[in-house]
Image (tube, helix red, strand yellow):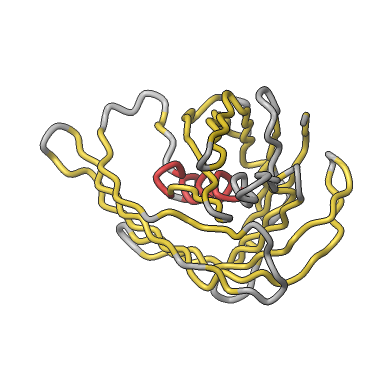
Amino acid sequence: MKKLVLMGTVLFCASIGINAQKCNMYFPSREGSESEMTSYNAKDKIEGVTKTVILKKETGANGVSLLFESVYSDNSGQEKGKGQYKVRCHNGVFYFNMESMMPQQNGDQASMEVKSDELEFPANPQIGQTLKDAKMTMVMKSGNVTVMEMSMSITNRKVESYEEITTPAGTFNCYKVTYNVRTHAMFDVEVKAVQWVAEDVGVVKTENYDNKGKKVNYSLLTAFRP
């Protein structure tokens, strides 16, 4: 479950912010653009790497849609998950379906039934602004047998500040956004998440904390080709 939450957080962070008319993004928008997020545990050991590429961009009267592909590899470099997902911009709001947080796992023969809300982010975020919550529920089955039921809720989303952040990929001016992520399967896991996103770049840094305020993991943008 730990890797699932981590992958979901990375994919969520990679998909923030579009302006309706011009569709200026807090993510690169050119077909072929690539980014790499490296995830670490609290002891600075690499847990995995997520590489994302934009496969297709479509522009129309209703805004912009993008087709992404993300590949997640573990700390040994072995590919563990790969998936494609779409995001869209409409009427000044960016929409990202939470179902995209659940990439298909390599070798997984089970089927996944997913019901999810769309995460929203405004074209022009304001410091102190509260953003909408979202929820996703999943049922994994092998044939007619239910293997696992899981839910994920993202709540208390808020734009906190505007800060300069430096990572191995460079120095960026970022919006800092905080939120809570709660997952429920056999037991509950809740973390407080912090993310920093930059215009025309996307996620630059994330941090996750447990309910006692202890950092459990973090991610950094380690490579970027706009």
| Rendered location of residue 39, percent (x, y) | 66, 44
Q: Is 216 in front, or is 95?
A: 95
Instruction: Tell me where residue 188 sits by quadrant.
Output: bottom left
Q: Is 89 in front, or is 153?
A: 89
| Rendered location of residue 72, percent (x, y) | 56, 32
Looking at the image, residue 30 sits to the left or right of residue 141; the answer is right
Identify whether 63 is placed above or below 120: above
Identify whether 84 is placed above or below 187: above
- At horizontal 29% and vertical 50% (from top left) the residue drawn is 115
- At horizontal 36% and vertical 55% (from top left) the residue drawn is 136
Looking at the image, residue 97 sits to the left or right of residue 29; the answer is left
The residue sitting at the front extreme is 61
| Rendered location of residue 215, percent (x, y) | 66, 64
Q: Quadrant of the C terminus?
A: top right
Instruction: Tell me where residue 35 sits by quadrant.
Output: top right
Q: Is 49 in front, or is 62?
A: 62
- At horizontal 74% and vertical 46% (from top left) the residue drawn is 220
How many discs appear? 0
Looking at the image, residue 137 sits to the left or right of residue 203; the answer is left
| Rendered location of residue 211, percent (x, y) | 54, 74
- At horizontal 34% and vertical 57% (from top left) the residue drawn is 151
